[in-house]
Structure formats: structure tokens, C-alpha cells
Image (spheres, rainbow, N blue to C red):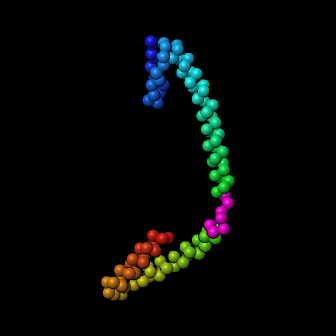
Amino acid sequence: MTECWIFEGGGKIGRYIGGYHDARAQQEQHLATKQPVAKKNEEVIASKAEIVKRGSSKLSYKLRRELEQLPGQLEDLEAKLEALQAQVADAAFFSQPHEQTQKVSGRFKSGGART
């Protein structure tokens, strides 16, 4: 029995029974049956992506309300940060007890992370 190995690319080696011409014929037959499946998979993936695009364009009531409230929340956080910055910028701030300055600096850091 004769066996033929063909380098198919992409690090794959195909094993075929028979000579070189038999191997090529088997390889073409294998590729012909594999190609329609790949096209069908691409169509399914494209249709799923289209469904996701259509589905994600409509927000739920809760998400819509949350989105509408974000600018106001952002303004509130920015105002709090400005107040904390003014407090830290005051010359007398660091003459206060360490516990008090740590609380303010902790709020300042956490407020900056949330914005």
C-alpha cells in the first residue's frame, strides 16, 4: 500500500492513500465538500451579527433612565471634586489632625476614580 503526505499550509500535513495524483484528487474532493459548509457558517455569523445590531439599538426603560441621569451625576461628582480640591488647596488643611486629612484625601481619590 502506498501513502502520500502533502503539506497543505498552515502547519497541516495531509495523509492520503495512493500516489500523488490520487492524493490530489482526494484533496480536491475534501476541499469541495468543506467549502459550502464554510460559506454557510459565514452567512450564519453575519445574520447573528445583524440580529445583535438590531437588538442592541433599543434600550430598556431602566437603562434609558440611567443614561439620562448620567450627565447630572457627573456634574455632581465634579462639583464634589472641586469642593475637595478647594479644601486641600487651603493652607490650613495640612495643619489639621492626620485622621481628618486622610478622610478628605481618601474621598478625593475615590471621587477621582468614579469620574
The span shown in magenta is 57-63
Residue 13 appears anywhere in the view: yes
Residue at position x 45%, y 72% from top? 112
In the displayed structure, 4 sits above or below 74; it is above
Q: Is residue 60 left or right of residue 99?
A: right
Q: Is residue 6 visible?
A: no
Whether the magenta-drawn stretch holds residue 27 is answered as no
- Taking the image as shown, residue 54 lies to the left or right of residue 91, namely right
Q: Residue furthest front?
A: 1
* x then y, percent, for residue 49: 63, 48
Q: Eyeballing the image, is 60 above or below 48?
A: below
Residue at position x 68%, y 53% in the image: 54
What percent of the width, then of the height, locates residue 24? 53, 17
The reply, left or right, for residue 53 in relation to residue 100 is right
Q: Residue at x 61, y 73 (%)?
A: 69
Q: Residue at x 62, y 66 (%)?
A: 63
